[in-house]
Amino acid sequence: MFESWRGKPLEDLLYECRELLEDTSFPTVARWRDGGGKVAGHFQVYFPEEIAHAAGMLPFKVRGAPVEAVRADSLFGSYLCSILKTSLELALSERIRLDLFVTHPICDAARNLAAVWGRNFPHPCQILYLPQNANAAAAPAYLRHEYGRLLRLLEPIAGRRVSDADLRASLAVYNRNRALLRELYRIKRETPWQLAADEAYVLVALGGLLRREEHNQILETALALLERRTNKKQDRIRLVFEGGFCEQPPLDLLRVIARSCYVVDDDLLIGLRWVLEDVPLEGDPLRNLAVAYLENSSYSPVQHDLRKPKEQMLLQRIARSGAEAAIIAAAKMCEPGLEEQAGYAQALEAAGIPYFIGEFEEKMSTFDQMELQLQTFIENILFA
């Protein structure tokens, strides 16, 4: 679905990937459908893409876009976050065409998305109910049942039955993808001058637009080229970016941040990196996937797990990456993100870690003020 990166040097490969990511006509999704393929759209944060992949569908991460919500704006209150409106606008304006839309009750606004979408489109619009209590003994069995319900929903849309062998094959593809993304983030942590924050983001985000086999090929090529990159280390502080779990900051904002510091870890598009290690291929694949979601996963403000207190998880992320400070960001009108800012700030204050609090919106187009504030923040650390 995406060929223009092949055979090109790293800078050109990154350029082609950036152009694809910022193309709000989503040409790879259109090509997939034009070729007779089915598209399973899923809203933030996490979705078990392996199940849709095993059914031969294209899992497409619906994550909004920097477009004007001309039609969608009238279907939502003005006090809601941008991603809800622009995601619907993409479908209403037929920039994307889906065969299924799945959302999750991650916040008060998102839990109503399936009903809003369902009133406007003929294709199924469903809610995937991830466990509210991840610590309950029944959570793995419950989630396995919910994944089974999702599979039964997908099969008639895909026009095929999905076997355990199909699921294991998809798990293997995604395990490879997880390994490649871990390597990408290792480079961010250990040699961040070789991979800027916006470059890493582009390479990760393409996973929401392509079948994972193709994404794996891009990552394998990019990683090999990064090994030969000869950027020189500069005197910049190391930062963690926190707050990109749902609505995404503009790519230009990440580019602005990368000009001032090294972003050595983040929670950007954390749903694509939610499962931290390989999912076992032996046994019941749906149960293995359910256990991985609960027991071997990252954290976010929209999952409530007493074993993963958000503040402590952030401090661990900072320590593991060797960061000296943190950017605590939140999307405008994002209730979970804004609530977590207070807890994060208190924990960082107690730990003596400098932090910068910011707010963003996917449609932002000017960053001069934030860049000036960030540079002042960094200079205060460097020259304290």
Image: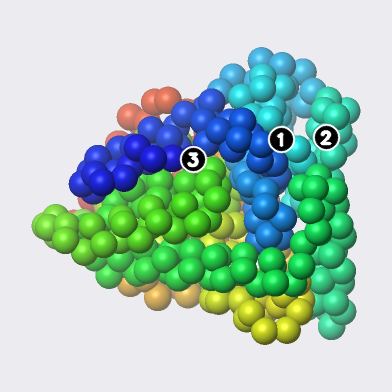
Tell whether 257 sits left or right of 164.
Answer: left
Residue type at the position of mark 2: His
Q: Amino acid at mark 1?
A: Leu
The disc label shown at residue 123, or none: 2
Q: Mark 1 or mark 2, which has the lower sequence index?
A: 1
Q: Residue at x 33, y 42 (%)?
A: 5
| Residue drawn at x 52%, y 36% as measured from the top left | 28
Q: Is residue 117 above or below residue 57?
A: above
Circle 3 or circle 1, nearest the eye:
3
Percent coordinates x, y for residue 35 in the rendering: 61, 35
Where disc 2 sits, the SS reads: loop
Residue under the point 69% across and 67% down: 167
Residue 321 is marked as none
Q: Residue at x 16, y 57 (%)?
A: 229
**Closest to the observer, 7 or 150:** 7
Query: For this rendering, which residue is in front, 280 or 248?
Result: 280
Residue occupied by mark 3: 1
Q: Is residue 158 above or below residue 4?
A: below
Sooner in the amino-acid sequence: mark 3 or mark 1? 3
